[in-house]
Image (cartoon, rainbow, N blue to C red):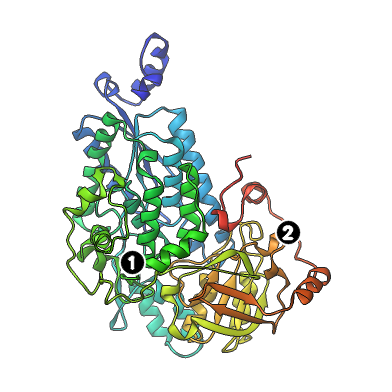
Amino acid sequence: MRSDLMKSGVDRIPHRALFRALGLTQEELDRPLIGVVCAKNEIIPGHMHLDRIAEAVKAGIRLAGGTPIEFPSIGVCDGIAMNHEGMFYSLPSREHIADSVEIMANAHPFDGLVFIPNCDKIVPGMLMAALRVNIPSIFCSGGPMLPGRANGKTVALTDAFEAPGAVRTGKLSESEAADIVEHSCPGCGSCAGMFTANSMNCMTEILGLGLPGNGTIPAVDSQRIILAKHAGMKIMDLVRDQVLPRQIVTAASIRNGLAADMALGCSTNTMLHLPAIAHEAGLAFDLNHVNDISEAVPHIVKLNPAGHHFLVDLNNAGGLSAVMKRLDEMGLIDTMARTVEGTWAQRLERAAIRDDDVIRDREHAYSQTGGLAVLYGNLAPDGAVVKKGAVLPEMMVHTGPAKCFDSEEACSQGLREGRVQAGDVVVVRYEGPKGSPGMREMLGPTATLAGMGLDSTCALITDGRFSGVSRGASIGHVSPEAAAGGLIAYVKDGDQIAIDIPNHKVELLLSPEEIALRRQQVVPQPPKKVTGYLKRYRAMVTSANFGAILKDE
């Protein structure tokens, strides 16, 4: 056993003495030691119940003859960190989580690991760690939140973020907004729609590192506890057979993940996290291939904020196994890709599609192409990402004058002051991985635009990123970013910007001569003064098209 490095032999007498201090018996030490990485805390609604998941996981480990040892992980609630300086730390926390798990798992050589994440950057951070450490691992997430009811309709966090803009424009009363505050997030779990947290929990299951249901079973459902016990038992099989994460997450798994991503219309943040995960697995990830997959895969599931269904509806419809069954019927996935319990072919034998409206066939798909697209042009020669499944038809092709802001705060103020008009292309820059630093989410501005009813006439382009809650013609991850000399730094108010999502284009309509003159005349914004972790992060972070990973050297 790997754990013998810290518990067996004459030289490990002092180590065993320290294990005795923990209250472990010799019988427990004789068994495989399984690290249980739990991100429970009291600031993230999606994590407040993870102690219950951890106890169930540990029960499963003991049932299967192992000894669980729990240790924690940090986590940031993106919703609570939104629209203030807290968001600088969200994406950088992903690298910190991966590093901290690596430290714990190698300083204490566990035989296997069970990861218990749920929200935003915690899931990809743990996935990166699992592939980096590469010892037997399985994931059991906390599960999605149920939607709420307010003002006589089903609501979720989307409604809460769009409420300020709706109140300011008279579309929503303050009492109606208060009802949304009280009821849009009714309890524990990752927010109810296909936002970043649920997108990545779904990806974990698709990549093969989670059991069926990991991405969709509601947080409050007893099946989530049962799933956790099964995950605890399954890790013992993986340890016995020495099945490693890099044997599961392969090039085929990544392609399956992208196919499911397009079918589901996941958060644009998957285009940061999947490259980072692939990197830790030693796999190439070419952003250029995303559009190829998107062109082949129809958008067959449309969840909030793009549609009116929620994760609970997808779960009731058969979950991700049913989605993969539908994609297999179209010949769009590799069913020989491995999971923690065999191949996808074996998993699909048990899959059933229970609702053809939630999980549509190709004939009735929302679109014959996928929910995400990568755009290119002089404004984004290295790519930009849009959740096209959440873009209104009238905004798929749009040309309009630029309205430029050098920060999220400046954009939010401009929106409040009415400086953005119908038809404008809002440009928010210096919010990239280096410029922010930390690549903040622009949910505040996109939600305000939607709440004001401008999502049908305005686009937003940024070198920052978006929450999965965002909808509309929201184009992010512009690379190169402004802080790295990207053309987005040289756009002026009134410049015409052409967006053509079906043809994957985003262009600043200026001549090469005028662009060259701009680069000579316009002085870029100086770097923000930062200290501590953010200073180190800025020095090491790469561009969004590489997943905003940290330089290896």
The amino acid type found where label 1 is placed reads: Ala
Left or right: 35 with respect to 382?
left
Locate residue 403: give its quadrant. bottom right
**For mark 1, what is the residue?**
192
Residue at 69%, 84% in the rendered image = 494
Residue at 18%, 57% in the rendered image = 351
Of residues 207 and 437, which is closer to you in this image?
207
Residue at 37%, 49% in the rendered image = 252
Q: Quadrant of the C terminus?
A: top right
503 in relation to 346, above or below: below
Of residues 227 and 385, which is closer to you in this image?
385
Tell me if residue 194 can be seen.
no
Percent coordinates x, y for residue 92 in the rendering? 55, 52
Q: Residues within 10 Å of mark 2 (few under 14, many from 20)?
A: few
What kind of element bears circle 1? Answer: loop
Of residues 418 and 548, which is closer to you in this image?
548
What kind of element bears circle 2? Answer: loop
Tell which circle, 1 or 2, labels the residue nearer the N-terminal end: 1
Percent coordinates x, y for residue 321 in the rendering? 24, 57
| Label placed on residue 527 | 2
Whole-angstrom CA distance, mark 1 to mark 2, is: 37 Å
